[in-house]
């Protein structure tokens, strides 16, 4: 049983500007494999540097498309877990809230979060690899092999950020600005390796924010946090909400 230091709940209750950074770990309890988890993780099964890059797509567009189609199908079948819903509750209770996610699974929106910054895109959006523009109603193109852009005939790709690609400028700028003005920064379920997302917690602590990590394992961010809540997000986050707002439980 993880003990929640009372200071964490008190600080969260009094917080004016909360930023939460999430990674694949918050979707783990929904049944979405994380990148890093040795047994089930995608990183073990598919080396992202083989698949999640523009070079891989140019080399073998069908393999990359099929990997995302498999992931999209898996995510369509899962639902948000208590960790996602706890972040919805925090958003409803604090004056200023930003949820910055590295995840592309759309589960935060499905859970009811509003102020979401998707740093790495969304697996349910598709864009033309050639024209680099979003393609709407592409679903009827599915199931007939590799789909092509209805406008130019080029390949379609998922609207996600691959390794070596720059993040959406507005999304990253918004995330940095929010992190720099946060008084409470919660980092949940991320191995803290992928940049520039992994630098956001440091934008916050450089300006005096309280940094709290929720993760069953230590990460490169752990030595810098004010508090580590060592455990699963689906258990820790609901407990944190109850501890911070016992009167609203
Ligand atoms: C960029 C979308 C500027 C796609 C992702 C060489 C050339 C080019 C770039 C680089 C380079 N060397 C380094 C870089 C930078 C590179 C990078 O950071 N590489 C790493 C490997 C060192 N970054 C980039 O390329 C970024 N772009 O820098 O542009 C640029 C441009 C050109 C040249 C230079 C610079 C783009 C990065 C975005 C990549 N896209 N996703 C897709 O999903 O397919 S990244 C992807 O991996 C995720 O989005 C996420 O960010 C990352 C996985 O990390 P996590 O989410 O943390 O998940 P992980 O599995 O690792 O960990 C899970 C954690 O959860 C664990 O800690 C576990 O303990 C915990 N957990 C498990 N269960 C639970 C739990 N926690 C709580 N509760 C539980 N129940």
Image (cartoon, rainbow, N blue to C red):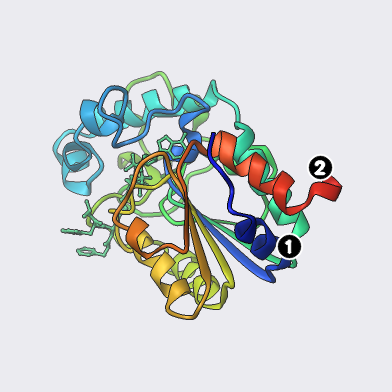
Residue 35's quadrant in the figure?
top left
How packed is label 1: few (under 14 Cα within 10 Å), some, or many (20 or more)? some
- Vertical placement of 19 versus 155: above or below? below
Q: Which mark is residue 177?
A: none
Location of residue 137 in the rendering, given as x and y in whole percent from the top left corner: 55, 36
Side of 43 where 78 appears, left or right? right
Q: Which corner quadrant holds the N terminus?
A: top right
Distance, label 2 to label 1, CA atoms, is 15 Å
Side of 208 where 48 appears, left or right? left
Q: Earlier in the sequence, mark 2 or mark 1?
A: 1
Residue 142's quadrant in the figure?
top left
User: Would residue 125 be visible to someone looking at this image?
Assistant: no
Location of residue 82 in the rendering, given as x and y in whole percent from the top left corner: 63, 34
Q: Which corner quadrant holds the C terminus?
A: top right
Location of residue 24 in the rendering, given as x and y in whole percent from the top left corner: 42, 40
Q: Nearer the viewer, residue 193 or 226?
A: 226
Judged from the image, the secondary structure of the residue bearing numbered disc 1 is loop
Label 1, ligand 1: CB separation under 8 Å: no
Residue furthest toward the left?
59
- Rendered residue at 42%/62% (across/down): 225
Q: Nearer the viewer, residue 76 or 194?
A: 194
- Rendered residue at 77%/57% (across/down): 93
- Vertical placement of 58 versus 114: above or below? above
Side of 193 where 14 appears, left or right? right
Q: Which residue is mark 1?
A: 94
- Rendered residue at 67%/39% (across/down): 85
Q: Which residue is mark 2?
A: 249
Location of residue 197 in the rendering, given as x and y in whole percent from the top left corner: 37, 60
Judged from the image, the secondary structure of the residue bearing numbered disc 2 is loop
Label 2, ligand 1: CB separation under 8 Å: no
């Amino acid at each position: 049983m993880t003990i929640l230091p009372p200071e964490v709940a008190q600080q969260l209750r009094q917080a004016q500007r909360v930023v939460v950074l999430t990674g694949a770990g918050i979707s783990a309890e929904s049944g979405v494999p994380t990148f890093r988890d040795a047994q089930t993780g995608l990183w073990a099964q598919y080396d992202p540097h083989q698949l999640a890059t523009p070079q891989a797509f140019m080399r073998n567009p069908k393999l990359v498309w099929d990997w995302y189609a498999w992931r999209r199908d898996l995510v369509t079948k899962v639902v948000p877990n208590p960790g996602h819903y706890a972040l919805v509750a925090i958003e409803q209770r604090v004056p200023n809230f930003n949820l910055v996610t590295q995840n592309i699974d759309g589960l935060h929106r499905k859970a009811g979060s509003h102020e979401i910054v998707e740093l790495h895109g969304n697996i349910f959006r598709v864009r033309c690899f050639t024209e680099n523009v979003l393609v709407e109603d592409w679903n009827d193109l599915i199931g007939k092999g590799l789909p092509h852009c209805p406008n130019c005939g080029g390949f379609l790709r998922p609207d996600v950020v691959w390794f070596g690609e720059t993040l959406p400028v507005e999304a990253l700028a918004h995330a940095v600005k929010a992190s720099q003005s946060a008084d409470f920064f919660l980092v949940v379920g991320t191995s803290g390796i992928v940049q520039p997302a992994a630098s956001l917690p440091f934008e916050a602590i450089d300006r005096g924010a309280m940094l709290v990590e929720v993760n069953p394992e230590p990460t490169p961010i752990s030595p810098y946090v004010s508090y580590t809540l060592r455990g699963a997000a689906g258990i820790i986050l609901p407990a944190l909400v109850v501890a911070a707002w016992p009167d609203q439980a």
